[in-house]
Image: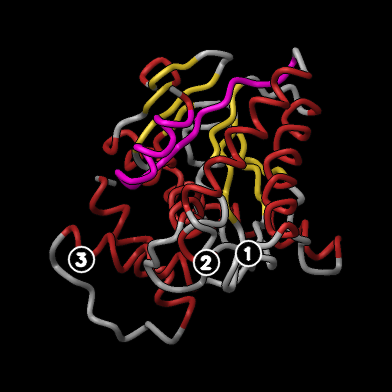
């Protein structure tokens, strides 16, 4: 199969499986097809799927990752103390682990083509990531508490692992409890990284955006927490602060510089 044929196969299989999209018109252009495929990934419930589908999906997503361009830690902006900064799509980073700002269900974002990082990570990883998260949550038996961390495989992402953490949701003024919980997100991810022997970890801007934690306050907590942890732990992984917006890039450069 060509890359385009793989995409059409995946679309048709997911449309057939869902029933709801079975009669939907498939766009003729590549970008329209890519958007439809992402939407179908997003809304799919965590249930078993054929090995043939996974084989073709993995081939397709691996090629998509290559086309986006893989970025390693050597391409990031470096600061003292094993800290790095990089602006761009976190799903392009080739490090040991990337951090996903998840919701309490830990199943990814079900809103088709939503702009959150949870959606981006699950879309690029493939359906296996939601399946693994579902198994973790089924065993746990209750929603994921804020400030903790869980680790999964990364599947079709260029990193090795995804570490999922649920940040605090801010409504109104930031409280001391909000600050404590956000700090715990970073600490939990770093502790889990040490346990697993992870050498490099990329943090997104946890709790900003959809969870409304003010960007500068969140960045200050992130930087201070990471610096303090690295000073106390010689086996702490190298840390990449991953930002997407220009404003966040300015904030982190100021704090790190």
* Residue position marked by numbered label 2 in the rendering: 109
Q: Which residue occupies 75% across, 59% down?
A: 177
- Give me the C-alpha separation between circle 3 and circle 1: 28 Å
Between disc 2 and disc 3, the foreground one is: 2
Image: magenta residue range: 235-255
Left or right: residue 149 versus residue 245 is: right
Say which element carries label 2: loop
Label 1–label 2 contact, CB within 8 A:
yes
Q: How is the image coloured?
A: secondary structure
Pick whichever, 102 or 81, lies toward us: 81
* Residue position marked by numbered label 1 in the rendering: 103
Q: Which residue occupies 71% across, 62% down?
A: 134
Q: Badge 2, how many Cα within 10 Å: few under 14, some, many 20+?
A: many
Residue 18's x, y, as percent?
48, 79
Task: Looking at the image, tell me whether mark 3 or mark 1 is earlier in sequence order.
Answer: 3
Image quadrant containing the C terminus: top left
Look at the picture and state if 219 lies above or below 214: above
- Give me the C-alpha separation between circle 1 and circle 2: 8 Å
Left or right: residue 105 versus residue 257 is: right
Give the image quarter of residue 39.
bottom left
Look at the picture and state if 120 lies above or below 85: below
Between disc 3 and disc 1, the foreground one is: 1
Q: Which residue occupies 42% across, 49% down?
A: 56
- Give me the C-alpha separation between circle 2 and circle 3: 20 Å
* Residue position marked by numbered label 3 in the rendering: 32
Task: Looking at the image, tell me whether mark 1 or mark 2 is earlier in sequence order.
Answer: 1
Say which element carries label 3: helix
Residue 138's x, y, as percent?
81, 65
Between disc 1 and disc 2, the foreground one is: 1
Pick whichever, 251 or 126, lies toward us: 251
Q: Is residue 122 magenta?
A: no
- Can the viewer see residue 249? yes
């Amino acid at each position: 199969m060509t890359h385009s044929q793989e995409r059409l196969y995946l679309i048709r299989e997911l449309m057939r499986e869902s029933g709801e999209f079975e009669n939907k018109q498939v766009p003729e252009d590549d970008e329209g097809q890519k958007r439809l495929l992402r939407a179908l990934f997003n809304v799919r419930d965590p249930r078993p799927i054929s090995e043939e589908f996974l084989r073709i999906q993995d081939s397709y997503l691996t090629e998509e990752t290559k086309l986006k361009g893989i970025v390693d830690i050597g391409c990031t902006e470096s600061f003292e103390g094993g800290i790095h900064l990089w602006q761009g799509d976190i799903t392009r980073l080739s490090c040991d682990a990337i951090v996903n700002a998840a919701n309490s269900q830990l199943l990814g974002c079900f809103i088709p083509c939503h702009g959150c990082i949870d959606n981006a990570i699950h879309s690029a990883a493939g359906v296996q990531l939601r399946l693994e998260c579902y198994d973790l949550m089924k065993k746990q038996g209750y929603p994921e508490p804020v400030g903790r961390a869980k680790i999964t495989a990364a599947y079709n992402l260029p990193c090795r692992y995804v570490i999922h953490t649920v940040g605090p949701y801010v409504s109104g003024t930031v409280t001391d409890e909000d600050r404590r919980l956000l700090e715990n997100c970073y600490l939990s991810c770093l502790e889990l990284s040490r346990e697993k022997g992870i050498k490099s970890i990329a943090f997104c801007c946890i709790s900003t955006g959809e969870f409304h934690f003010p960007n500068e306050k969140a960045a200050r907590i992130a930087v201070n927490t990471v610096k303090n942890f690295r000073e106390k732990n010689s086996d702490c992984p190298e840390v990449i602060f991953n930002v997407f917006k220009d404003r966040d890039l300015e904030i982190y450069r100021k704090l790190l510089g």
